[in-house]
Amino acid sequence: MQKECILVIGAGGQIGTVLTEALRSVYGQSQVIASDLKPLPESSGPSLILNALDGQALNDVVSKYQITQVYHLAAILSATGEKDPLKAWDINMTSLLNILEIARQKPLHKVYYPSSIAVFGQGARHENTPQLEVLIPETVYGISKATGENWANYYHKRYGVDVRSLRYPGIIGYQSLPGGGTTDYAVDIYHYAIRGEIFPCFLHANTALPMLYMPDAIRATLELMEATSDKINVRTSYNLAGMTFTPAEIASSIQKIIPDFNITYQPDFRQAIADSWPASIDDSAARNDWGWKPEFSLDAMTKDMILHLQ
Ligand code: SER
């Protein structure tokens, strides 16, 4: 059997940083090539600079390193995307289509493409949002992810590309910082708490959003990608859930360990984005098809985050 050689695109990002190391521990350090737009810090394996908008450069890297799987984590997220919608659309779609085309032509064994709760919007049920729900996203990020899911499904059905996807909720971890998302507050809040500062939250106290702790997010990704193809019945993207909480609830979870911690609420344009997203997600398709089960609750995550950040 050919040894897998994995290319991670966006390896310097919030999830890419952690996922690259997790993939290296499974497939071997030299078998996982980390790539990003900017030079990556010294890490445990090979890395290179790559712009996924440059299809030829991508093609060259895939040939040179005999890449068999691509994890495409680069994207402009919800809040940043609203500042320049056409640029966000171009970056998010061109990079995906470049990868899908190479996957079809080379061919690659597998492609991973994250989607997001941002695909939901107008008309979608707010609580326990089902797998099959109306998708009328209200951000350009959500539009690009909903469209990307459909392209993934199309490349699978038409060309047999084994592309798999998860609709990540907000992801929280101590290893890396998110950039430009609406759920970022739930990472920043821990950094403020550790520094002993008051946290100015850009969402209302009672804005419930679906969230997932990084170890669960990484495990979900690896389990999805390792499942046999016959278990993957959803070729757009799987709903994925961990926990749901509001800014007030995460603040009181932190106060159980750091009693002096304080939060203030100063909602900005991101409030409307959060309001358009589900509060909770029905992930029964992922549970039934490939055995997904989250481990971390809010309090367990808070304990672990504070332990590591301290
Ligand atoms: N974390 C993302 C964002 O807030 C959602 O997928 O944009």
Image (spheres, rainbow, N blue to C red):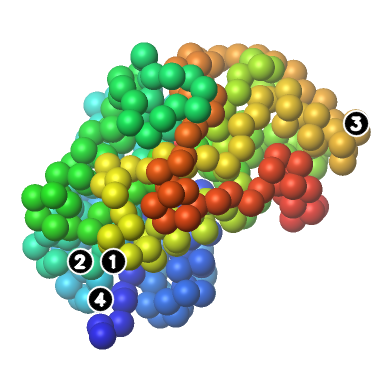
Q: Is 237 located above or below residue 246 in the figure?
A: below
- Earlier in the chain: of badge 3 and badge 1, it is 1
- Earlier in the chain: of badge 2 and badge 4, it is 4
Which label lies toward us, 3 or 1?
A: 1
Instruction: Identify the residue shown where x is 12% and y is 67%.
Output: 106
Q: Is 292 located above or below residue 245 in the figure?
A: below
Disc 4 and disc 3: Cα gap in Å? 52 Å
Amino acid found under the numbered disc labelled 4:
Tyr
- Earlier in the chain: of badge 1 and badge 2, it is 1
Label drawn at residue 256: none
Tell me: is circle 1 under 8 Å from ligand 1. no
Disc 1 and disc 2: Cα gap in Å? 6 Å
Question: Can I make out residue 258 in this image?
Answer: yes
Answer whether labels 3 and 1 touch (C-beta < 8 Å).
Answer: no
Residue 157 x/y as whole percent? 13, 49
Judging by the rendered image, the residue that carries numbered circle 4 is: 65
Amino acid found under the numbered disc labelled 2:
Leu
* Label 3 neighbour load within 10 Å: few <14, some 14-19, many 20+: few
Answer whether labels 1 and 4 touch (C-beta < 8 Å).
Answer: no
Camera-side residue of 48 and 205: 205
Judging by the rendered image, the residue that carries numbered circle 1 is: 69
Judging by the rendered image, the residue that carries numbered circle 2 is: 108
Q: Is label 4 in a helix, a strand or a loop?
A: loop
Residue 197 quadrant: top right
Which label lies toward us, 2 or 4?
A: 2
Amino acid found under the numbered disc labelled 3:
Asp
Judging by the rendered image, the residue that carries numbered circle 3 is: 260
Disc 3 and disc 2: Cα gap in Å? 52 Å
Answer whether labels 1 and 2 touch (C-beta < 8 Å).
Answer: yes
